[in-house]
Image (spheres, rainbow, N blue to C red):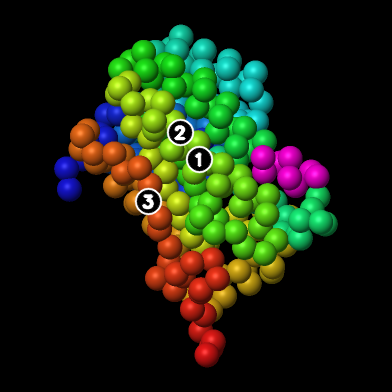
Amino acid sequence: MENRIQGKRILVTGASAGIGRACAERFAAAGAHLLLVARRFDRIEDLRARLSREKSVPIACFPLDVRDREAVGAFAGELAGRQLTPDILINNAGLASGLDPFQEGDWDDWDRMIDTNVKGLLNVSRALVPLMIAAGRGHIVNVGSLAGYQVYPKGNVYNATKFAVRALSEGMNIDLAGTGIRVSMISPGAVNTEFSEVRFHGDREAAARVYEGYTPLYAEDVAEAVFFIVNAPPHVNVQNMLITPAAQRNVYCVERAGQA
């Protein structure tokens, strides 16, 4: 496969763990220049040190909470001032918090998901897209979910945020026609990362049960799919890619060992 991203500048939000970290590792292996963003700055600094040593590619790290609109604006200004406009933006920062019936939902969980999954994506995109338009090039990949296609019990607000990511991706694609900016969304099914541990507020046993009896996706599988999307020829725009484990056919149909 031709490598079209070597030397390109790729910004990954939520790069401290899971899909974001796996994307950073995959892009570094392909010779991309990385801008890594996360709240947990120590983690991305450790990742930078390792990847710089192993792959010898330029990597810059920035502590940033995508929910903080003022901080995101200042971050975009810093990138512009340092002439670090990204060629590719991976809007990966996101989470699920809680798994409750709607009528018992926790306001803090709801705010955390909406502020990160929807407003965070808006904050970063609104701040950086004008820079990419001015450069006359760019590719945005929004990390959605199978949950943005099918609602499942107790998913309510998380589902709503991922339906929003899907709608925003389609809207961005339309509005950015003629600018040279491509917009893609990748929608994974079950991926074994910190996702479920965060959802269950640190309950590792509950998180592990989500993946019992079948082989889920791993962060590296999703990163490989993202690489395929951003490595496509310039005339190709993969608008959406839905990717699930072979054992999962939709949110309700998961083939687990021992099931009839």
Front-most of residues 208 and 166 = 166
112 in the magenta segment: yes
Q: Tell me which label, 1 or 3, sits earlier in the chain.
A: 1
Give the numbered dot on residue 39: none
- Separation of residues labelled 3 and 2 (CA atoms): 16 Å
Q: Which residues are magenta?
A: 107-114
- Separation of residues labelled 1 and 2 (CA atoms): 6 Å
Q: Mark 1 and 3 residues: CB-CB less than 8 Å, in contact?
A: no
Residue at image mark 1:
167
Front-most of residues 257 and 17 = 257
Foreground mark, 3 or 2? 2
Residue at image mark 2:
171
Circle 3: element type: strand
Front-most of residues 207 and 101 = 101
Give the amino acid type for the residue marked by disc 3 in the picture.
Answer: Met
Circle 2: element type: helix
Structural crowding at the residue carrying mark 3, measured as other residues with C-alpha within 10 Å and reported as few (<14), some (14–19) or many (≥20): some
Considering only vertical position in the picture, is 136 above or below 67? Answer: above
> Which SS type dominates the magenta stretch?
helix
| Quadrant housing residue 196 | bottom right
Residue at image mark 3:
241
Identify the residue at the far top of this view.
81
Foreground mark, 1 or 3? 1
Q: Position of residue 87 (x, y in %)?
A: 34, 26
| Quadrant housing residue 23 | top left
Determine if residue 94 is in view: no
Q: Mark 1 and 2 residues: CB-CB less than 8 Å, in contact?
A: yes
Residue at 52 percent of width and 80 percent of height: 256
Q: Position of residue 137 (x, y in %)?
A: 30, 22
Circle 1: element type: helix
| Quadrant housing residue 205 | bottom right
